[in-house]
Amino acid sequence: MNYIPLIAICVSSVLSVVAIVISALSLRNSRRAQHHTQIVSFEQRKQEVRQTFFEGQLMLGEINAELNRAIPLFNDAGSMWPNADEIAEVAVLRHRCQNFLKNVVDRLPSSSSTQARLKLEEIGGEAILLNKDIQVMLKSVRDASQTIEKMRQELPSKKV
């Protein structure tokens, strides 16, 4: 009896089973790597959103510094700035920023589920819009502060 074809079939079958096991392990490792990549990118995006938020808080600090510097000056210059609406707008922006991190970003799940990723993108958009509002307010405060400073510097020259 010729055993060579029978041995070839057995070896071929064993090699096929080994190839299937290796493919299954590769697929499992690929899915793990993909899941890990999703988690890492989710956490990176979460950090980007937080960084955007903190940039907004830094700008709010600049607004406060400008207001603290300008408010005493505007009394001397006889200016009507800042009015109650502008001060209220700064307070609202500050309140929005404080609540943003406390109530939204810290509540996000650490999983990278589709729902969590969508929520994170929504929050990222809100953070960007909030920062744009703060940038506009900062520019307005800086411009008004410069105007007040110029008016204050001109007052002594007019009195003389």
Image (tube, rainbow, N blue to C red):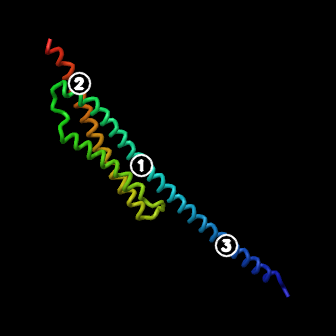
| Real-space Cα separation, disc 2 to disc 3, in angstroms | 77 Å
Question: What amino acid is labelled 1 in the image?
Answer: Arg
Q: How many labels does the image show?
A: 3
Residue 103 horizontal/vertical position (percent): 37, 56
Closer to the camera in the image, 89 or 127: 89
Dot 1: what SS?
helix
Name the residue: 75% across, 81% down. 9
Outermost residue, top side? 160
| Real-space Cα separation, disc 1 to disc 3, in angstroms | 44 Å
Dot 2: what SS?
helix
Name the residue: 21% across, 27% down. 148
**Residue under numbered circle 3:** 21
**Residue under numbered circle 1:** 50
Q: Is 130 situated left or right of 159 in this image?
A: right
Outermost residue, left side? 159
Q: Earlier in the sequence, mark 1 or mark 3?
A: 3
| Real-space Cα separation, disc 2 to disc 1, in angstroms | 35 Å
Dot 3: what SS?
helix
Image height check: is 141 above or below 17?
Answer: above
Residue 23 horizontal/vertical position (percent): 63, 70
* Label 1: few (<14), some (14–19) or many (≥20) C-alpha neighbours in 10 Å: some
**Residue under numbered circle 2:** 149
Image height check: is 2 above or below 147?
Answer: below
